């Protein structure tokens, strides 16, 4: 128990911590290096694997990757509560990023295209934004930094793999499905936030429906009125659709060609 408490204290973010963490710097050296590693590993691996791809040969790898995406999100709350400044109320693994991980993993395990419809648009849209403008206070090796970039980086890696190696196609119906599924789940997620509740500072905030993200985002460019819940959804929903249209554009142009 003594060793466990020491490890736990190592990760705390209060003034009593024995470790001095460096504040996160948006597009600072560590941020750019991390993004570079995620991007280069994803592209190099996928374009190399594409040359040797055989569905049967890679079946084991894809199954392991699929389970890894799902299981890591399910056990992550226990690590965050144990080693970080979290309660279970604000670590429920049902954020959009979590659901994107589940959908990506389930596609690898089932090849059901509906899972990839959701995974592609929310993973490349919302997930990439999370990598570019992460909601973290401290940089590496803080647990928040490691947790965010490892999970979102794994999703990005897998989506690139699915697009490049498996050559999964995206249609306009895929875009419609991604928006439709999210809008259908939205009211249930809002009610779930109210049910879970939590102490001040640890309240459930799934899909950032109760409070906006503290990190930098495109919301910063809009009037203050639209930055605060629930009015931020008046911007978030159409903004997401615009981003999705840009993500669909390469496939649309390929169809026309």
Image (cartoon, rainbow, N blue to C red):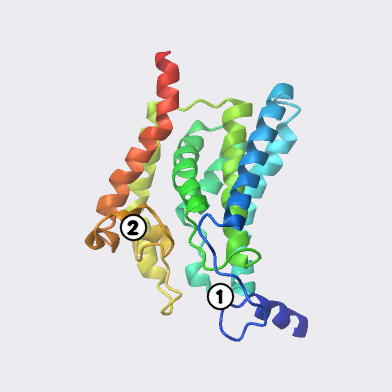
- Closer to us: 167 or 25: 25
Q: Position of residue 30 (x, y in %)?
A: 61, 57
Q: Which residue is mark 2?
A: 220
Q: Position of residue 209 (x, y in %)?
A: 35, 61
Q: Position of residue 117 (x, y in %)?
A: 46, 35
* Residue drawn where x is 34% and y is 47% of the image: 184
Q: In this view of the protein, can residue 204 be seen by the observer?
A: yes
Query: For the residue labelled by badge 1, is the local secondary structure a helix, a strand or a loop?
Result: loop
- Whether 155 is drawn above or below 216: the answer is above
Q: Quadrant of residue 8?
A: bottom right
- Closer to us: 178 or 36: 36
- Whether 10 is drawn above or below 90: the answer is below
Judged by depth in the image, the label closer to the viewer, 2 or 1, is 2
Q: Which residue is mark 1?
A: 85
Give the spatial CA distance, label 2 vs label 1. 26 Å
Categorize mark 2 by other alpha carbons within 10 Å: few (<14), some (14-19), many (20+). Answer: few
């Amino acid at each position: 128990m003594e060793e466990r408490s020491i490890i736990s204290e190592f990760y705390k973010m209060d003034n009593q911590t024995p470790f001095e963490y460096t504040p996160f710097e948006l597009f600072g050296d560590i941020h750019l290096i991390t993004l570079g590693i995620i991007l280069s590993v994803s592209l190099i691996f996928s374009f190399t694997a594409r040359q040797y791809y055989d569905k049967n040969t890679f079946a084991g790898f894809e199954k392991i990757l699929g389970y890894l995406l799902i299981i890591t999100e399910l056990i992550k709350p226990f690590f965050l509560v144990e080693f970080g400044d979290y309660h279970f109320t604000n670590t429920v693994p049902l954020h959009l990023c979590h659901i994107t991980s589940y959908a990506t993993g389930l596609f690898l395990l089932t090849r059901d295209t509906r899972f990839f419809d959701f995974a592609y648009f929310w993973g490349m849209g919302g997930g990439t934004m999370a990598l570019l403008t992460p909601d973290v206070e401290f940089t590496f090796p803080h647990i928040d930094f490691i947790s965010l970039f490892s999970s979102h980086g794994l999703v990005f890696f897998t989506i690139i793999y699915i697009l490049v190696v498996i050559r999964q196609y995206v249609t306009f119906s895929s875009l419609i499905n991604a928006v439709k599924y999210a809008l259908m789940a939205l009211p249930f997620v809002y009610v779930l936030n109210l049910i879970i509740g939590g102490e001040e500072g640890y309240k459930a905030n799934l899909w950032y429906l109760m409070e906006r993200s503290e990190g930098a985002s495109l919301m910063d460019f809009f009037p203050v009125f639209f930055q605060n819940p629930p009015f931020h959804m008046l911007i978030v929903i159409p903004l997401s659709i615009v981003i999705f249209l840009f993500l669909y554009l390469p496939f649309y142009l390929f169809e026309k060609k």
